[in-house]
Image (cartoon, grey):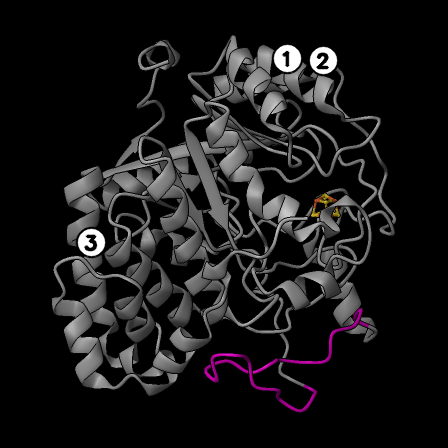
């Protein structure tokens, strides 16, 4: 059995986070090529007063590497069958969900609907490997999607090198596989059963995919499961380790925050907008060439503020149900939505005694449990699409979102890649 890699140990760097002062933050902002030392300073509480300066530097770097473009994509959930028991997920096996997967005809119909919305980059999703949604099913869906879309990536289950090679041959360009949390102890707690419990198998999957010839790797952490500072440091180190070996690949980093789901799980660590913004700026400073991705989990105002200021890639008009685009309301497809802001983020004040996280910067927010307060449950039910994996916060349609980006001087990009270029270098 493989051992945990050395880079997962961030204890010395968490000590540096705790010890950093204003001089360390100034040094980090002045560094030519900031690295782990600088990231620790920029994530420390001492960096909070420097957020505006970090934003300015992040925006400069984003423009240098991506211009004013924002790459847009949409996820397509193929199946919600899942045998795993991830405590935070609306598709977990113990959730009361109607289970289904798209037939190949339905996949065609969903893709046609996404194409009509103008999208050219598509992310195909399933849960962990099941009899209903196995490798053969995913490969067939990739083949269908690759016939219509310029860029097809998958966010499915960890695969073998040979399976990733077959996906590449079918037209898949990359994978997204969030570790969720790099804290092995917390990982074991929240992944209660099922194949996703295998921490190392998941950790090593992006390397297998790049070894097999996929060209894009999306890494991420689900903020709220564990100490966000420790997870951010490890996320950075994971990207750097992969870059050393697979320097020709492209990378994107994501940092979704936990959202309401039908099971009522809530975050052990609450991450506010101020910290998330600083995390985005810090990662941009330390990884200037990587895409930083922000999904529709986040509120419109926050997404608008981050676009181009660190963030270079965004999902749009997302549905977290299986399918859902072909029959989607007009507001999701293209016509401007009525402008009603979704209900506020479902965060509650701590009811438990705070417990320090590893960085000493964050404290555990509340006892982890299913919500039992009836009013909370009603709110969760109102917020969560009953068949969705989690609640989407930004419900704007493609046209409305693109108009907002353009009004901010940004250029939404649907296609900056053509599958024909896959031949080069192979
Ligand atoms: S996160 Fe993925 S593996 Fe876990 S329960 Fe949800 S769909 Fe299944």
Mark 3 CB lies closer than 8 A to ligand 1: no
- Kind of element beneath mark 2: helix
- For label 1, count other residues whose C-alpha is less than 10 Å away and answer few (under 14), some (14-19) or many (20+): some
Q: Are marks 1 and 2 in contact (CB under 8 Å)?
A: yes
State the mark number for residue 59.
3
- Using residue 377 as the reference point, say whether residue 247 is left or right of it: left
Query: Is any atom of residue 317 visible in this view?
Result: no
Cα distance, mark 1 to mark 3?
38 Å
- Looking at the rendering, which quadrant does residue 416 occupy? top left
314 part of magenta stretch: no
Q: Which residues are magenta?
A: 351-371
Kindly report the secondary structure that dominates the magenta region of the rendered protein: loop
Q: x, y (%) of residue 150? A: 42, 16
> Could you give the CA–CA distance between mark 1 and mark 2, rounded to whole angstroms?
6 Å
Q: Residue at x 74, y 22 (%)?
A: 102
- Closer to the camera, 378 or 323? 323
Is the CB atom of the residue marked by disc 2 within 8 angstroms of ligand 1's nearest atom? Answer: no
Is there a contact, CB below 8 Å, between mark 1 and mark 3? no
Tell me which numbered mark, 1 or 3, is placed earlier along the sequence.
3
> Where on the picture, by quarter, is residue 4?
bottom right
Q: Find disc 1 in the rendering and name its residue.
A: 108
Disc 3 residue crowd, few under 14, some 14–19, many 20+, Cα 10 Å: many
Tell me the element at label 1: helix
Number of residue marks: 3
Q: Please state which of residues 356 and 347 is positioned toward the viewer in this rendering.
A: 356
Q: Which residue is mark 2?
A: 104
Q: Is residue 91 above or below residue 227?
A: above
Does residue 384 appear to the left or right of 95 in the view shown? left
| Residue 33 x, y percent position in the rendering | 17, 57
């Amino acid at each position: 059995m493989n051992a945990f890699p050395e880079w997962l140990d961030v204890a010395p760097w968490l000590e540096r986070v705790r010890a950093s002062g204003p001089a360390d933050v100034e040094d980090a902002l002045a560094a030519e090529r900031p690295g782990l030392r600088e990231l620790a300073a920029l994530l420390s509480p001492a960096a909070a007063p420097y957020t505006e300066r970090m934003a300015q530097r992040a925006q400069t770097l984003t423009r240098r590497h991506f211009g004013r473009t924002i790459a847009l994509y949409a996820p397509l959930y193929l199946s919600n069958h899942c045998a795993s028991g991830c405590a935070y997920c609306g598709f977990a096996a113990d959730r009361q969900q109607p289970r289904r997967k798209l037939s190949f005809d339905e996949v065609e119909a969903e893709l046609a609907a996404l194409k009509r919305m103008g999208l050219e980059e598509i992310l195909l999703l399933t849960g962990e490997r099941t009899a209903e949604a196995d490798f053969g099913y995913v490969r067939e869906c990739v083949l269908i999607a690759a016939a219509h879309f310029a860029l097809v990536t998958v966010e499915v289950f960890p695969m073998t090198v040979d399976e990733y090679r077959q996906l590449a041959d079918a037209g898949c360009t990359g994978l997204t596989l969030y570790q969720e949390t790099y804290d092995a102890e917390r990982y074991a707690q929240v992944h209660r059963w099922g194949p996703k419990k295998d921490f190392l198998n998941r950790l090593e999957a992006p390397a297998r995919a790049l070894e097999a010839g996929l060209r894009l790797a999306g890494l991420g952490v689900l903020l709220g499961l564990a100490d966000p500072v420790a997870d951010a440091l490890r996320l950075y180190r994971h990207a750097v380790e992969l870059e050393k070996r697979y320097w020709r690949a492209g990378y994107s980093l994501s940092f979704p925050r936990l959202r309401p789901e039908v099971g009522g799980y809530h975050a052990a660590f609450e991450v506010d907008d101020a910290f998330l913004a600083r995390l985005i700026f810090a990662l941009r400073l330390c990884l200037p060439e990587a895409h930083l991705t922000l999904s529709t989990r986040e509120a419109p105002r926050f997404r608008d503020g981050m676009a181009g200021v660190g963030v270079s890639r965004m999902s749009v008009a997302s549905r977290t149900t299986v399918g859902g685009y072909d029959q989607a309301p007009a507001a999701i497809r293209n016509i401007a939505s009525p402008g009603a802001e979704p209900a506020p983020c479902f965060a509650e004040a701590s009811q438990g005694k705070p417990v320090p996280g590893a960085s000493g910067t964050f404290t555990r927010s509340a006892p982890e449990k299913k919500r039992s307060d009836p009013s909370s449950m009603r709110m969760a039910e109102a917020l969560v699409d009953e068949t969705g994996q989690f609640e989407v916060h930004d419900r704007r349609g493609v046209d409305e979102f693109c108009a907002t980006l353009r009004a901010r001087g940004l250029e939404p990009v649907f296609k900056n890649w053509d599958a024909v270029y896959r031949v080069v270098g192979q």
